[in-house]
Every structure is written in structure tokens, then in C-alpha cells.
Amino acid sequence: TNTPLRRRRWGVPVLLVAYVGYVGLGAGVLQALERPAEVRAAQQLLQQHWELLANHTCLQPPALQRLIQGIIQAYKSGITLQGNSTSLGRWDFSGSFFFSISAITTIGYGNLSPSTAAGRIFCILFALFGIPLNLVLLNEIGQLMLLGVQHCAHRLEEVFHWQKKASLLIKTCALVTGLLLFLLLPPLLFFDKEGWSYEEGFYYSFITLSTIGFGDYVIGMNPDRTYPGWYKNVISLWILFGMAWLALIIKFCINFLESSSDFCQCNKKSTEMAEDLMDGNKNSMTGLHDVEICNDKDTKTKGPAESHTYTAPTEAL
């Protein structure tokens, strides 16, 4: 009876060490890749600052600093300078709609946020009820996708009398179709509408659908470009269905890791019981019975009812 508790007790520290090690590895690699570029950018900015002051002696450093701070604050509010005029549009209906989507999906790009007290309070209340609604919707979309895959697999089994091949084929097709619709083809649209490279578009697609949302790349924010009215609405639908699809993929990966962990634990338990039997520490009939149970658990073939019990793809988020 204490075996699950003992397994949890040892499993958490091991996972915690692996987690911290993985994050540390990422930190080291990112520092090696990004730190030199950061230093170069800082040096270039400082050089441009002093060159501007040297070429325009009438410009005082405090005044320049205030201008820079004003530009930064205006940009955070969605306002940019275009010659002698300013550009608006981030808080029109389409921009507000896209911001609402990014809020309740927890993407949170960070490039745009409410600047008024009333707007911040409303954003809190809106997200408080919107996030659960979004999770329910993503779960339903994910279940619909999964049911479609299972239905196609059943049809192939009935028509071609395939068993495992049909399920594997349909899952592979669903994976490839999802990769095309949500990760591989959208960068081409972003290349046309945003002027991004394919690598930048692919990076934006994954960062968005995984809800990381750094905010360094956001669609529809370039004041020098004109966007069609349908653009942000289509991207909003792409985000919803893409998040559901990616949640399914993550859930499958979690199930695979958990099943691999169970397999290793079961093999370890079988080995320990076999050693105990040889040493005479346990009753032979009890030990053999436990080994058979463990082996049966690994080799048991799932029935139709067990093979379709997947629930809540949003648990992976």
C-alpha cells in the first residue's frame, strides 16, 4: 500500500532536479547565444546617443531623455510617429478583439496593455471569467478533433479490415495536417502581410500557440503596412484551433512519458521480486503472482472502450 506513496516521494525530487537542470541548460545556451548581441546593441545605442548630441549641440541631454521616454511610453500605448502625424488603430474594434483573445488564452504578448484604471479593472474581471470559458472551448475543440481522428480510424478498419495500421495511419495524417495548418503554412501568410522571414513566422507561430507569448513579434502592429479587415479575425480562429491541436500533441507526449515511466517502474519491481525469490526473502507464490500482475499490466491490450478515454486536452497547457 505504501508503494505509490514511496514512488511519489522519490519521483518529485528526481523530477525537480531534472526540471532545474533543464532550465539551467536553457539559461546557459541562451546566455551564450544572446548576450553578445545584447552587448552590441547597447554599445550601438549609446554611440548613436552621443553622436546625436555632438551633431546637434543645441539639444540638451535632459530634453533628449524626456523625448525618448515619451516615445517609449507612446509606443507602449500603441501610438507611433509617422512624419508630423501619429498612427492609431491598436484600440479599434479589431485590435481590441485580438487583445481580448490574447488575454483569455493567456498568451499575453505584453506589447499592449490598458493604460486607464477602468481598463485594468475590466481586464481583470474579463480574464477571470474568460480564461475558464476559453479552457472549456479548447477542450471541446480538442475532443472534436480527437473524435474525428477516431471516426476515420474506425472507418478504415471497417473498410480495409486494418487494426493497428489504421490507427497509426490516421494519427500520422492528423499530425502532418496539423503541422501544415498551424505551424508550416502560417509563416507564408506572415511573410506576405508582415514582411517577416519564414523563420520569424515559424517562431511566432509556435510561441503564440504554446501561449508563451514573448511579444517580440505580434501581427498587425506595423504602422507602415495596411492590413485587410479579415486578417486579425482569421488569426484569432487560427490561435483557437491551433492551441487545441498543440494541447493534444502535448497531452500525447505526456501520456507517452508517463507510460514509459510506468514501464520502467514495473520492470524494476519485477527484478526486485525475482531477486527476493532467489534469496528466499518472500513467499514464492506471492512473488510469482506479483510478477505476473506486473507483466500482464505491460502486455495487456486495450479494448475499444479503453482506447478512447482521452479527456481534457487543455490539461497539457
Image (cartoon, rainbow, N blue to C red):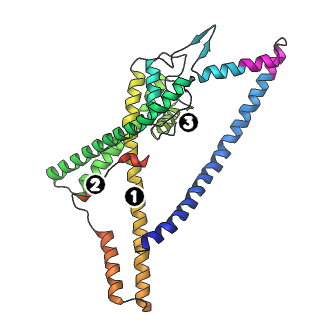
| Residue bearing mark 1 | 256
- Mark 3 → mark 1, Cα distance in angstroms: 29 Å
Which portion, as a residue range, is magenta? 50-67
The residue drawn where x is 25% and y is 62% is 302
**The N terminus sits in image quarter:** bottom left
Image: 265 above or below 208: below
Residue contact at pointers 1 and 2, CB within 8 angstroms: no
State whether residue 184 appears in this view.
no
Disc number at residue 214? 3
Is 167 contained in the magenta span?
A: no
Q: Nearer the viewer, mark 1 or mark 2?
A: 2
Is 56 contained in the magenta span?
A: yes
| Residue bearing mark 2 | 309
Amino acid on which disc 1 is placed: Phe
Residues 243 and 170: in front is 243
Q: Residue furthest top?
A: 84
Badge 3 or badge 1: first in the primary sequence = 3
Image: 10 above or below 306: below
Q: Secondary structure at mark 3?
A: loop
Image x and y of residue 317, in percent: 44, 46
Disc number at residue 43? none
Badge 1: few (under 14), some or many (20 or more) residues near its Cα, within 10 Å?
Answer: few
Image x and y of residue 113, in percent: 55, 27
The residue drawn where x is 19% and y is 55% is 162
- Mark 1 → mark 2, Cα distance in angstroms: 15 Å
Badge 1 or badge 2: first in the primary sequence = 1
Amino acid on which disc 3 is placed: Phe
Image: 14 above or below 89: below
Total tally of numbered discs in the picture:
3
Amino acid on which disc 2 is placed: Thr
Residues 43 and 113: in front is 113
Residues 212 and 54: in front is 212
